[in-house]
Amino acid sequence: MNNYALILIIVVYLAFLFFLAYWAEKRHRGRLVNNPYIYVLSLAVYCTAWTYYGSVGIASQSGISFLAIYLGPVIAMPLWIILMRKIIRISKQHKISSIADFISMRYGNNRLLGALVTLTCLLAIIPYISLQLKAVSETFALVSNNGYVTSGVWLDSTFYIALLIAIFVAFFGTQSTDASLGKRGIMATVALESVLKLVFFLAIGIFVVYFMFDGTTDVYLKAASTENFKQLSSFGGLENGFNWMFTIFLSFFAIFLLPRQFHVAVVENQNINHLKKAIWLFPLYLLIFNVFVIFIAWAGNISLPSSVNHDYYSLLLPLQSGNTFLALLVFIGGFSAVISMIVVSTLALSTMVSNNVIIPYGFIKKLVEGNPEENAKSIKNIRRVAIFLLIIIAYFFYILFSNQLSLFSIGLISFVVIAQLAPSFFLGLFWRRGTANAAKVGMVVGLLVVMYTLLLPIVADVISPGSQIADKGLFGYWWLRPSQLFGIDYLTPESNAFLWSMSFNTLAFVGLSLMAKGNYRERNYAEMFVHNENYENLQEGAFVWKGEAYVADIRRLLNRFLGETRTKRALTIFNRKYNISEQEEKADSRLINFSEKLLTGSIGSASAKILLASVSKEKPISLVEVLNILEENKETKATNRLLIEKSEELSQMASKLQLANDELLLQDRQKDEFLDTVAHELKTPITSIKAASEVLEDEEMPPELRQQFLMNISKDTDRLGKLIHNILDLEKLSSNRTELNIRSGKINKTIKKAIQGIERIAEQRKVQVEFNESDYLEGMYDEDRILQVLTNLLSNSLKFTEQEKGIIKILLEEKEQEIAIVVEDNGRGIPGEDHNYIFEKFYQSRNQNTKKPQGSGFGLAICKQIVESHNGSIWADKNVPKGARLVFTIPKTK
Amino acid sequence: MSRKILIVDDEPNIVMSLEYAFKKKDFEVFIARDGTEALEIASNELPNIILLDIMMPKMDGYETLKQIRKNKDLDGTKVVFLSAKSKLADVEKGMQLGADSYVTKPFSVKKVITDIEHMIA
């Protein structure tokens, strides 16, 4: 194909992408641009030229091991979704614009850490970008039929393609100074490119399998006859299994940590629910992509001479069959894979370079002095320069270094380097102890190990061929051989490097984190990241800050970056949200946090922190304070609930007080009634005595009658004395002033004593008293008092039973904890309405003018007091056909 | 014409003294131990005077008075409460129900007799 025609096609294709990006940018709110499919397709930026060409190369030489790179993300997809939810929530909350921002913020906006992450990413990605350029250059050469790669920069079409890509990124990637905002235009082109690369790759697969050969079986049978086919189609032994495992891990880390993956998955996520589509669609995409890889590789091995570059079988096969059009499509597919990777990578890297290195390490002073338009321009220019620099450096790297390396190995090296972010990234999400220093040291240690194990042999080979280090080990120690560190010799160089760098990195990170705690800022952010669900609704409230700052200073600072209008609008919203007066002069932690977040999008979290520190006097906070404030913040949401609970408690307390007051009033009234009752009880015998005395004045009264009156007076006097004794007794009992002499005793003996006491009267009235004396039970009681109760009950029974016919029975019932003593008779019984109050010491209630059964006086009230002070109870059984049945209980001896 | 008096009280010793004193003054004395008994005797004997206790078993004095006042035959009968309930509210309640007098216990027998003789003179 003609060289210029191909260039024209490329230019037209790029122009189309420009147009698409422009269109999508205009309709950034439309459904065509904001849907989960765009999101999933943009995730497919994971498939680069490495997938497109490199997989085939690897499959043709070393079998199916290329699959591990795609199996990692497929296997771990459910976990990816879970982690992503958390990562996206945190990032949106803090306006995070890159993985460097994410990690540096987790460790307290640590400037050096952000720079280190950026450096790691550059180290991993620039060679990777250069390999993509190499792919463009080589495939261009193949398709344009020149057969060779031009060597001069100015004659190299790849250089101009790279420049065009740089212009594209610089134009659409810096539309807004806020890097955390989505780049809808770029994402739309990435999605389209993902479609194209898949479709064209499938097309070549179908062409090879069904047109060049007669279906998959045909390819298999023909390939089976080649020499090393068995090795190409099997998994290898256990040792190879380790390689598989490590590669799967590696690719799993990469899907999170690669700057371009972080960018499309997190920064460009418009809706967290888009993740739901990704869970099945993205693995499906990867699987479909890899369906034909092995067949194209086999077909290439069969039909092409082994001298050609195996990576480009998918181009060479159609070219060999004379199908230039299909070769062109494959080229465009591969070109799409390249551009999307370069575009997103440089976009992400340039943000990191500007926000985590250039601005915090030098430009910040200039920005503080500038006005908003200048600052916005400066920030954008820094990013644009970064974009061009990145692509140009990548280009020269390709010119200088890449001849020795295949797409596959550079891809894996890049993955191993980027994996050095894993300990601080993943552990930082779940482990609060992780500190900034530990993260830095871990990362540096990991990188050094990677350099030693993976880069040293390559570099040594380039610089001084024949170097002994790779074969004999450093200083000649065999166990220091870079690719077989510590004598493990069955791992591939990449797996070896991954294993040891990860081990040392993690060890350093965990060990140092355990040895020394981070400062309050680190702990603060650690808490916010690890328990992000607690702070989701708190926003500005979650960050702990103590110090002095003035609103005017902060306003001036924000003006510089956001402009007057946006600043004013932001502050008005802020004041309204937290109900803060416009006149407030002092800034609080919420304003600091709010402003920091506003600035983070534009200049990165580390710079935002530095800027705010320049206008405020921050004071260190003790751990206790941090914890207290965090606790408080956590509870802010719960405060309302707490207040409600408190007021409920108060009203409960009030009603309890009301109850207590009612109780007191009742007691007061009962006391009155008791006194009334006492007075009434006393008045009756006194009236009787007084009346009798007056009548006795009559001298004509017959002597027998006189005798009778005198006897009445005597009886009433006794009654009076007994009454007074009972009143005092009752009062003592009910105020718990009586000390009971409680001992274990045989209740049958006590009952016998009580019966003896009333025996004489019973005999006089010819009333029968029945009790089985052999009933043997032991209880805990004060014998004198229980005797008093029994005597009282027996006297009542005697009083209310008829002479000669009366029968009184005493029964014992054994219960689980207590003994019930029953006194029953066949007398008049207790009238139904009296059951409720025969044990009360007051009967003269307001509407109660009828008397209790005669003679009961205070007797039963006293019985009740005595029984209750034994923790027993006394009651009159209502369900008796005739007579009365009174029961009381006392505790059993244990 | 003999003067009839009905003494209603459940305390036998008090009744005994009153009975002796009124008989001495030539009253024909009837005795009831509670309200129900009192109503029966009153409607049969139509006494000139009823001495009525308030705190009694079964039917109390107030209720008894209400029943007495329903009986037209007993319109001329004077009712005097004899009660240990000495609160003003109790006295007022008794008078409102139509009692002619209210004597609180303990009382002087002589004074009760003098008052009653005045009342029916």
Image (cartoon, rainbow, N blue to C red):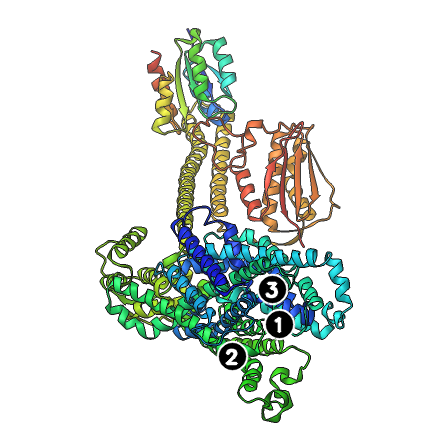
Q: Which residue is mark 3?
A: A315
Give left or right: position of A367 versus A34. left
Quick one: SS at disc 2?
helix
Work out whether residue A260 can be spotted: yes
Where is A3 relative to B12, above or below?
A: below
- For marks 3 and 2, the one nearer the N-term is 3
Of all residues, the one furthest to the left in this rendering is: A583
Q: Which residue is mark 1?
A: A309
Where is A25 relative to A788, above or below?
A: below
Give left or right: position of A705 versus A241. left
- Residues at marks 2 and 1, CA–CA distance in whole angstroms: 18 Å
Amino acid type of the residue that numbered disc 2 sits on in the rendered structure: Phe
Quarter of the N terminus of chain B within the rendering: top left
Amino acid type of the residue that numbered disc 3 sits on in the rendered structure: Leu
Q: Foreground mark, 3 or 2?
A: 3
* Mark drawn on residue A800: none
Q: Residue at x 46, y 73 (%)?
A: A394
* Number of dots carrying numbers: 3
User: Pointer 1 and pointer 3: residues touching (CB < 8 Å)?
Assistant: no
Label 2 is found on which chain of the structure? A
The percent position of residue B13, horizontal first and vertical second, equals 49, 27
